[in-house]
Image (spheres, rainbow, N blue to C red):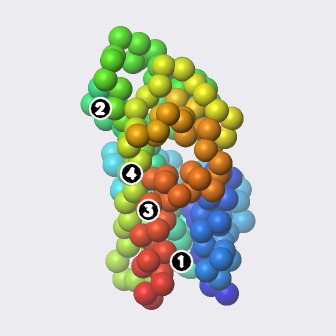
């Protein structure tokens, strides 16, 4: 069985990634299995930069293959914000509901609310150079939250072509269409060829 570490403490992300890799024979571990005290500061100005920083920080400690991602919500009317600041849009210690509330306030007078989730994944420790994968999920920002599943901006994100908020999808349904799921499929295709 192959070991693969995920450079995150986010239990939702860990579960999403495990559901994809465990059936392929991977034993998926995370920062929670290595060092619960380690906090990797996401201070880069791009999703690629943050993902690479997280992956390399953990790789330097364990010297084993590491997968990391950086994801965010990009709203056209806000010039791509919150972007790399998605997790801390309302402040460094902001909760999901606080980030959602601020985003809805900033869009109060906006009619065209097109947005997309973006994920950049990077795999290090397998090849000489990092392997990047990208995934996007198109949609728009709702006027109010709906749904009990998911996390982050899922309750206020309406999937393009649907009348459902992302928080109304089951984990299995979300994995089929999500930005992280799409990037993960690229990583899986790569892993199957190595």
> Is there CB contact under 8 Å for labels 4 and 3?
no
User: Residue 126: which numbered mark, if any?
Assistant: none
- Residue at the spot of label 3: 183
State the residue in front, 28 or 179.
179
Residue ID at (37%, 67%): 132
Task: Count residues near mark 2 (Cα–Cα under 10 Å), then give few for <14, some for 14-19, many for 20+.
Answer: some
The label nearer to you, 3 versus 1, is 3
Quadrant holding the N terminus: bottom right
Residue ID at (64%, 52%): 171
- Label whose residue precedes the other's in the sequence (4 or 3): 4
Q: Secondary structure at mark 3?
A: helix
User: Residue 76: which numbered mark, if any?
Assistant: 2
Cα separation, mark 2 vs mark 3, equals 21 Å
> Is there CB contact under 8 Å for labels 4 and 1?
no
Q: Is residue 31 left or right of residue 110?
A: right
Cα separation, mark 2 vs mark 4, equals 14 Å
Q: Is residue 101 visible?
A: yes
Q: Position of residue 138 (x, y in %)?
A: 38, 43
Q: Residue furthest top?
A: 109
> Is there CB contact under 8 Å for labels 3 and 1?
no
State the residue in front, 63 or 150.
150
- Residue at the spot of label 1: 65
Quadrant holding the C terminus: bottom left
The label nearer to you, 4 versus 1, is 4
- Residue at the spot of label 4: 136
Q: Is residue 33 left or right of residue 102?
A: right
Q: Position of residue 180 (x, y in %)?
A: 49, 56
The quarter of the picture where residue 31 lies is bottom right
Q: Secondary structure at mark 4?
A: strand
Cα separation, mark 1 vs mark 2, equals 35 Å
The quarter of the picture where residue 127 lies is bottom left
């Amino acid at each position: 069985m192959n070991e693969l570490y995920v450079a995150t403490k986010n239990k939702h992300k860990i579960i999403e990634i495990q559901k994809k890799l465990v059936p392929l024979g991977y034993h998926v571990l995370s920062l929670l299995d290595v060092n619960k005290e380690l906090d990797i500061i996401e201070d880069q100005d791009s999703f690629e930069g943050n993902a690479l920083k997280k992956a390399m920080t953990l790789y330097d400690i364990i010297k084993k293959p590491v997968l990391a991602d950086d994801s965010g919500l990009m709203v056209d009317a806000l010039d791509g914000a919150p972007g790399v600041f998605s997790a801390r849009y309302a402040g460094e210690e902001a909760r999901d509901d606080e980030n959602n509330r601020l985003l809805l306030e900033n869009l109060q007078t906006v009619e065209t609310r097109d947005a997309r989730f973006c994920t950049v994944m990077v795999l290090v420790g397998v090849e000489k150079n990092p392997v990047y994968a990208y995934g996007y999920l198109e949609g728009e920002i709702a006027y109010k939250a709906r749904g009990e599943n998911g996390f982050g901006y899922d309750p206020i994100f309406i999937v393009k072509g649907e009348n459902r908020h992302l928080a109304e999808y089951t984990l299995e349904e979300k994995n089929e269409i999500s930005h992280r799921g799409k990037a993960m499929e690229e990583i899986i295709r790569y892993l199957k060829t190595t």
